[in-house]
């Protein structure tokens, strides 16, 4: 099926890929948004299509105020329901009780535990029952993501992933936002190319890697939380 999808979307632009998914999979497709600039492009394109594709976001409980701001603006502009998935309350309570609210700074293992509780486990619930998972991933975002393909099988989640913006450049994303009046997170104008949880994200310097501001205290980290794995 992966090969067939690749063949059928070959040469299509992002809007046409979304339309393809809409026509072929409709309600069996889901899009995950974290309200980053790439995700805002996808949301705009989904809103222009048949609107059968479901949208969800992971509400980790540690997001920036600016993220909530663009979340509200997105709802106002596109009138699309975006389902929020929260971490398991008992799991969060146990982690914070045993290790404190900032245990993720203390070790890679603790950070991965926090990511799992706040993001990975809710993600499993969010995509369960769907055939297609649409993301805003671009190849140039990191070396890890360059190893991906625009259509791939996610064995960990048993789902087909499609990345309509995989070959887009940052300049193309920014041009699309401006041309179409798409709301975006104001932190992107303050040196935040990749925005996650507030305690784990900071601004980067010009020329730094796209994900240098994520988990910056982990010098050898691949800068991924586990939502998108290639191995």
Image (cartoon, rainbow, N blue to C red):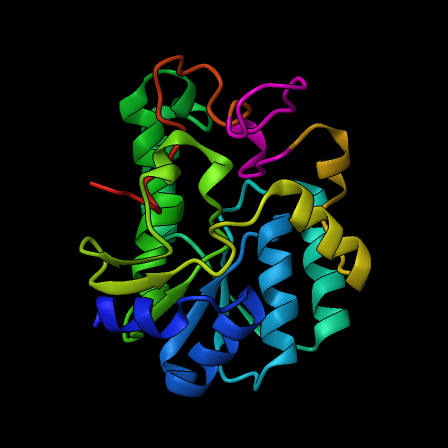
Is residue 32 within the magenta segment? no
Asked if residue 36 lies left or right of residue 153, the reply is right
132, above or below 218, in the image: below
Q: Main secondary structure of the magenta part?
A: loop
The spot of residue 196 in percent (x, y) is 54, 39
Q: Is residue 51 visible?
A: yes
The spot of residue 19 in percent (x, y) is 51, 79
Nearest the eye: 157 or 166 = 166
Asked if residue 98 lies left or right of residue 30, the reply is left
Asked if residue 105 lies left or right of residue 158, the reply is right
The spot of residue 105 in percent (x, y) is 42, 19
Nearest the eye: 101 or 128 = 128
Q: Name the quadrant of the N terminus.
A: bottom left
194, above or below 125, in the image: above
Which span is picked out in magenta? 193-211
Residue visible at 39% across and 47% down?
119
Residue visible at 23% across and 67% down?
3
């Amino acid at each position: 099926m992966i090969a067939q999808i690749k063949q059928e979307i070959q040469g299509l632009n992002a809007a046409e890929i979304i339309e393809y998914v809409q026509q072929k999979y409709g309600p069996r497709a889901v899009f995950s948004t974290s309200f980053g600039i790439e995700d805002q492009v996808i949301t705009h394109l989904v809103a222009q299509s048949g609107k059968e594709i479901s949208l969800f976001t992971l509400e980790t409980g540690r997001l920036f105020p600016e993220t909530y701001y663009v979340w509200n603006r997105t709802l106002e502009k596109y009138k699309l329901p975006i389902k929020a998935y929260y971490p398991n309350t008992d799991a969060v309570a146990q982690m914070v009780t045993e290790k404190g609210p900032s245990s993720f700074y203390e070790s890679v293992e603790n950070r991965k535990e926090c990511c799992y509780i706040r993001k990975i486990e809710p993600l499993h619930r969010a995509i369960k029952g769907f055939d297609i998972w649409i993301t805003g991933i671009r190849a140039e975002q990191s070396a890890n993501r360059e190893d991906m393909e625009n259509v791939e099988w996610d064995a960990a989640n048993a789902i087909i992933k499609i990345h309509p913006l995989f070959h887009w450049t940052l300049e193309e994303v920014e041009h699309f936002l401006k041309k179409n009046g798409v709301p975006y997170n104001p932190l992107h104008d303050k040196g935040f190319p990749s925005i996650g949880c507030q305690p784990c994200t900071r601004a980067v310097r010009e020329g730094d890697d796209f994900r240098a501001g994520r988990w910056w205290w982990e010098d050898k980290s691949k800068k991924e939380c586990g939502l998108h794995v290639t191995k």
